[in-house]
Image (spheres, rainbow, N blue to C red):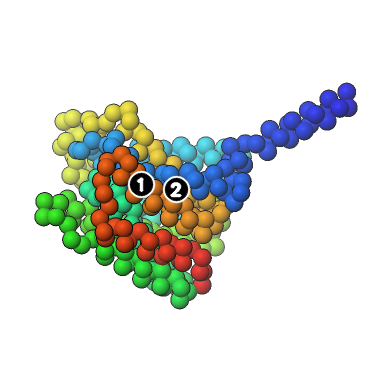
Amino acid sequence: HASHASHASHASHASQMATPPSILARRGGLGYLTIHAIQFGAQPLLVRTFISPGTSTTSLVLVSELAKIGGCIFMLVLNGELRLALKGWSFRGSLLVAGLPSLTYLVQNLCSQVAYQNLDGAVFNILNQSKMASAALFSFLITGRRQSPRQCVALALILLAGSLVSIGKEPQERATTRLGLVCILSASALSGFGSGMTEWALQGNRRNSYLFSIELAVFGCIVLLLCLSFDLTSEGDSWRQSGLFANWGLMTLLPVLAQGWGGIVVGLITKVAGGGGRGFAVICGLILTCFLKRLFFNEALSIRVIAAVPLVAASVYLHASSPP
């Protein structure tokens, strides 16, 4: 009986240890890093493959934000943190902390969706890293946080890489590429501003990160729905005539859910593996984008992109491994 009891206790202990989050967090968060690298690398190509031209950008962002809300609630329940996170919560406090950042993240997400559909996947992921520079700038302006000398070198490298892939397009590509460039650079600037505002809002405020993500997403969804209701978007007529989900298919959910849940994985990586781990996942994801582009679309990489990829890799590594 004693041996049975000991086996039972070992079995129950093993089952407690082998939860999906604990498995993914092993070896410095290797599971989470792998998921993030795959999602980051494949996302532009998933958007290109499964989102039809003319699909409502508002619908894509709305479903992505709802997916994020669902994912964060799931993580709070899974970790047994829901009650503690909501302790002392108030709408006024939530609005003060998450109100303004939610608007910047909402516009950033809208810009990103347009950029995904108007830029080459590798170019998108390279330019998307320019948010490091905007985050550093706004963090300094808003909170006074400085960068180390090596981080400044990293930011210069990312700006050089961005310049390389932004120039020299074919004339027939210029119109869509210009729109994509404006959108991704706007998204990167807004990401930096939102990051700085969040840092300022959360100083001295020990807010649960999942709860904060939910607040950002809920406020964003409310603003989106209000804009639709009062015809404050360019899609007001089209969604009334054809419906918000007119060009959706079942597979449209794949890139949208990946986008919504990807942010949750980033938060878990930062917690388990730190910024250096995330930087490594981004480098792997960037290489994966180039590989998938060649494999599935049989498209060769331009000389500029080939030159920019190692610059971005060096920049991400330097910035993550050289804190002030």
* Neighbours of disc 1 within 10 Å: few (<14), some (14-19), many (20+): some
Question: Relative to the observer, which residue lies in front, 289 or 187?
Answer: 289
Q: What residue does disc 1 label? A: 291
Question: Relative to the observer, which residue lies in front, 254 or 98?
Answer: 254
Q: Position of residue 30 (x, y in %)?
A: 55, 47
Mark 2 or mark 1, which has the lower sequence index? 2
Q: Is residue 63 visible?
A: yes
User: In the image, is 6 to the left or to the right of 215?
Assistant: right
Q: Position of residue 136 (x, y in %)?
A: 41, 67
User: In the image, is 285 to the left or to the right of 2?
Assistant: left
User: Residue type at mark 2?
Assistant: Ala
- Residue 37's disc is 2
* Neighbours of disc 2 within 10 Å: few (<14), some (14-19), many (20+): many
Mark 2 or 1: the one toward you: 1
- In percent of the image, x 51 and y 48: which residue is there? 33
Q: Quadrant of the N terminus?
A: top right
Quarter of image, res 77: top right
Q: Is residue 65 visible?
A: no
Residue 191 higher or lower than 229, as above or below? below
Question: Relative to the observer, which residue lies in front, 102 or 79?
Answer: 79
- In percent of the image, x 68 and y 33: which residue is there? 15
Q: Position of residue 181 (x, y in %)?
A: 23, 56
